[in-house]
């Protein structure tokens, strides 16, 4: 089961979309559809980890919205 969530700014403009796949991994895409990164709930010794577009771990836990650069 795939789930999509839209992330909007204060004014209601769509700034990102988060897609959660059946395996639990979530992927974030900007307004234009470019992947910004992903969250793997089994990463980092089972605690979950967030990775940027290049595969570099940026945080333990789910920090996908921190990858959004343009909130306007």
Image (spheres, grey):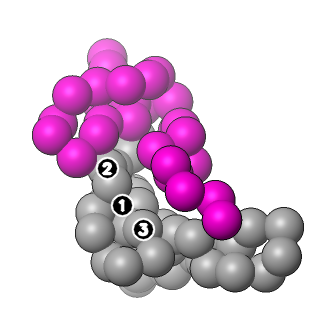
Say which quadrant the C terminus sits in. bottom right
At numbered mark 1, what does the secondary structure look like: helix, strand or loop? strand
Quadrant of the rendered structure where residue 23 is? bottom left
- Marks 2,1: beta carbons within 8 A: yes
Tag 1 residue: 27
Q: Nearer the viewer, residue 12 or 44?
A: 12
Q: Where is residue 57 in the image (x, y as percent from the top left)?
A: 29, 25
Q: Position of residue 53 (x, y in %)?
A: 22, 47
Q: Nearer the viewer, residue 15 or 25?
A: 15
* Circle 2 Cα neighbour tier, 10 Å, few/some/many (<14 / 14–19 / ≥20): many
Identify the disc placed on residue 42.
Answer: none
Q: Position of residue 60 (x, y in %)?
A: 46, 22
Q: Give the range drawn in magenta.
A: 43-72
Tag 3 residue: 30
Asked if residue 47 is among those painted magenta in the image, a careful observer would answer yes
Q: In this view, does 68 lie above or below 21?
A: above
Q: Earlier in the sequence, mark 2 or mark 1?
A: 1
Tag 2 residue: 37
The reply to whether residue 35 is in sight is yes
At numbered mark 2, what does the secondary structure look like: helix, strand or loop? strand
At numbered mark 3, what does the secondary structure look like: helix, strand or loop? strand
* Circle 3 Cα neighbour tier, 10 Å, few/some/many (<14 / 14–19 / ≥20): many
Residue occupying the far right of the picture:
10
Q: Which of marks 3 and 2 is nearer the N terminus?
A: 3
The reply to whether residue 46 is in sight is no
Q: Nearer the viewer, residue 19 or 69?
A: 69
Q: Is residue 8 above or below residue 57?
A: below
Please name the residue shown 42% across and 68% down the image.
Answer: 30
């Amino acid at each position: 089961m795939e789930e999509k969530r839209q992330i909007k700014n204060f004014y209601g403009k769509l700034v990102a979309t988060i897609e959660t796949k059946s395996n639990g991994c979530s992927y974030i895409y900007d307004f234009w559809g470019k992947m910004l990164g992903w969250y793997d709930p089994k990463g980092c010794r089972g605690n979950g980890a967030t990775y940027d577009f290049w595969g570099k771990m940026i945080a333990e836990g789910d920090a996908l919205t921190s990858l959004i650069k343009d909130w306007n």
